[in-house]
Image: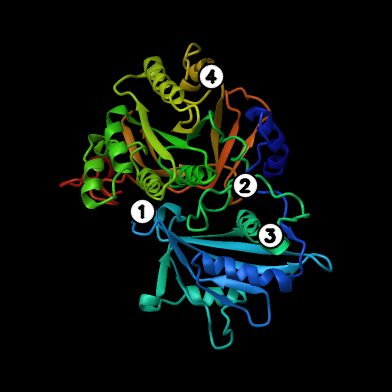
Amino acid sequence: MRRMVAGCLLLLATLSGCATRLVDFAPDQEAVYEQPIDEVWPQVRNYFLVNGFVFRETPNAAQLETEWREEFAGSRVAGYWHRYLVTAQPEGPHHSKLIITRDTRSVNKALAPTGSELSWHIDGRTDDNPNGFGSDENMLQQSLRVTGDNAIVGNSQHTARDMVMEWKVFRKIAPVLAQNATKSAASPDVVVTKEANIECGVPILGLGKLAREGNVVLLGELHGTQEVPHFVAQSACQVATQGIPVTVGLEVPDMNQARLEAFLASAGTEADWSKLMESPFWRSPYPDGRNSEGVVYLIAALRKLRAQGLDVAVFAYDHPPLEGDAREEAMAKTVAEVAGKSQKRVLLVVSGNLHPRQVKGVPWNEDYRPMGYRLASALPSVYSLDIAYKSGSAWICALDKEQKLDCGVKPAKGEDNGERYFVQLFGGKNRQGYHGIFYVGEVSASLPAVYRGVEPAGGTQATIPATQAGK
């Protein structure tokens, strides 16, 4: 499946229109300097110094490694750490390039494989490796140590080459090096409106050409995972840093709209959290995954992005107690109204994967018209994506043998297509009415936020439903 990603890039550009040159957020070519390493490297060092990174260098080599840097500082659910390994390599006799690798680790369980408990040391230097660079064995040994205040306890790890960062450095220092005479291949159209002080994670392949102004992207999810909210938060960050305003739609009762808007505009204090979480929505006796820790993480991340000057917004579009066609119509109407007022924005609308379908009929009702089907006839640029994932677990509500609703952690079977997030199109809609998929890696269950106590929930914490007692 991953082999098909490159082939879909042309289709993504076609879907987005031909008025402008649209490119992915993840460049597919390297930035090559027309100068040798000894000229390039001093400017590289200066770039990281100016942007506030603390780093160590390998003696007599063009290589540096930054210390761990916290993102979304102060958030107990959206914070994580990252660092860069930067190496300059020759590219022919008179040219050079940078290879930048990002290592991301999180203290938030929303990124953690089930049961993982990692710890690692910020400073990897040892007696036999004074520079801190080296083998996987060195990292393994460090990960087994807990060293008090100088250690970070983490729940996830992701390492990947960061070509976006390579181009950001190139675009800054190439004019200094060559006085704007950059005869290397023209840089991809990756225009980052915020400098290196905002970290949006490894670029999501295929997202950039679809998440464009005026587009409505319907994301059909599996409720109750940690990874889908993280995918949406990371997508919103990557879109917003391109200078494209982004609005995230949540399958949350519309009566929560004022609370969501107030929280995004707030300072995120204990009182702000309490006002958000005191809604009855978070205390359903049968939580179905839409009020999970992962969703709290997503809302917290959006508030942090907003606080850093990025143009992000959120809206709630569910309409209980409506059901069936009436509910689909009400949800479609709300999304269409937001889209009509947001023609310069991209909408990322998250829902259970029935609602985004753009075909009429479901197995139990041939006349059923899902939200996506209705929106496709009302708006010009609506794209529906179904979730794809590697097998894991999810918090799922389903009828048991006695036809009673049972909510809890259950297996979720999927297909392994690696660890990196990506978007892939089919070349038209499939029989279920989807244009493609969004892949989130291995899924892990996200429990209801209120009785795990992720953040303050007013004066009272909800209790675990009786059906979960003893599980």
Q: Which residue is mark 1?
A: 77
Q: Choose the circle earlier in sequence order: 4 or 3.
A: 3
209 horizontally vs 343: left or right:
right
Is label 4 or label 2 in front? 2
Q: Amino acid at mark 1?
A: Val
Of all residues, the one furthest to the front in this rendering is 179
Which badge, 4 or 1, comes first in the chain's sequence? 1
Q: Amino acid at mark 3?
A: Ala
Of the image marks 2 and 1, the number of the one nearer the N terminus: 1
Tell which circle, 1 or 3, labels the residue nearer the N-terminal end: 1
> 129 or 53: which is nearer to us?
53
Q: CA distance from mark 4 to mark 2?
A: 29 Å
Q: Quadrant of the N terminus?
A: top right
- Which numbered tag is attached to residue 376? 4
Question: Horizontal placement of 238 versus 274: left or right?
Answer: right
| Mark 1 vs mark 3, CA separation in Å | 38 Å
Q: Are marks 4 and 1 in contact (CB under 8 Å)?
A: no
Tell which residue pokes out farthest to the bottom in this image: 127
Mark 3 sits on what residue? 174
Numbered badge on residue 146: none
Mark carried by residue 190: 2
Q: Residue 367: where, in percent of width, then height?
A: 48, 11
Query: Gap between marks 4 and 3, in whole Å?
Result: 44 Å
The residue that appears at 30% across and 32% down in the rendered structure is 257
Sooner in the amino-acid sequence: mark 2 or mark 3? 3
Residue count near mark 4 (Cα–Cα under 10 Å), binned few <14, some 14–19, many ≥20:
many
Q: Which class describes the residues within 10 Å of circle 3: few (<14), some (14-19), or many (20+)?
A: many
Q: Secondary structure at mark 2?
A: loop
